[in-house]
Image (cartoon, grey):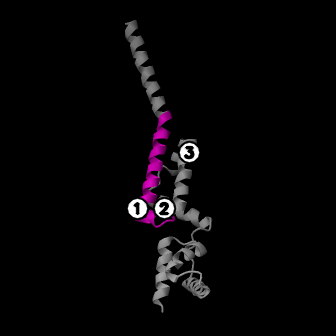
Amino acid sequence: MGKIRLIMKNVKLFDTFIKVNEAMNKPNTMAKDVFRDATDALTKTMGGRKLDKKYVKDYLKSIEQMARKNPGQLVKDYGDFDINDWIEDVQYNLQNEGKLNEKVSEKEVFAYLRDLRDSGKTNMFGAGEYLEKAFNLDKRTARELLTKWMKSF
């Protein structure tokens, strides 16, 4: 009877050890899942692809560092994020850092393009890069505005 109790006690201790070990390792596993979800949302979706690629790369690098440094906190802060939340978070950060300017008026852009053309700095088919830098636009938006300006002639 004493051996059975000892065996049962050892089984309970082993079960407790397994549960504690799983609880301790769970944030690491979940942090990997959170990082994978962020990567997928920002690189494999239409919304994510519209974002500035360089910024997304830096953003994901910071998420990865957070996952390594404090996986539990990453899971706590970002564990329930879906695709739209990841995209919205990047857009919010871009706006606060002045890297996304959704309020650029066509009038401002067209005036800039007119001045750029008059300066002779570039062939206007290459002006998209100038728009990206001058107005902090993504490549697609810059091209759309350039095309619209060119069609106005």
Q: Amino acid at mark 2?
A: Ile
Seen in the picture, residue 152 relative to 47 is either above or below; the reply is below
* Left or right: 2 as drawn, with respect to 122: left
Residue that mark 2 sits on: 87
Q: Position of residue 115 (x, y in %)?
A: 61, 86
Residue that mark 3 sits on: 73
Q: Position of residue 151 (x, y in %)?
A: 45, 88
Q: Residue at x 53, y 82 (%)?
A: 123
Task: Tell me the mark number nearer the camera, choosing from 1 and 3.
Answer: 1
Measure the C-alpha gap from mark 3 to mark 2.
20 Å
The boundaries of the magenta stretch are 24-52
Indicate whether residue 144 is drawn in magenta: no
Q: Residue at x 51, y 51 (%)?
A: 78
Which disc is residue 45 wearing? 1
Residue at disc 1, secondary structure:
loop
* Left or right: 94 as drawn, with respect to 80: right
Q: Residue at x 56, y 45 (%)?
A: 73
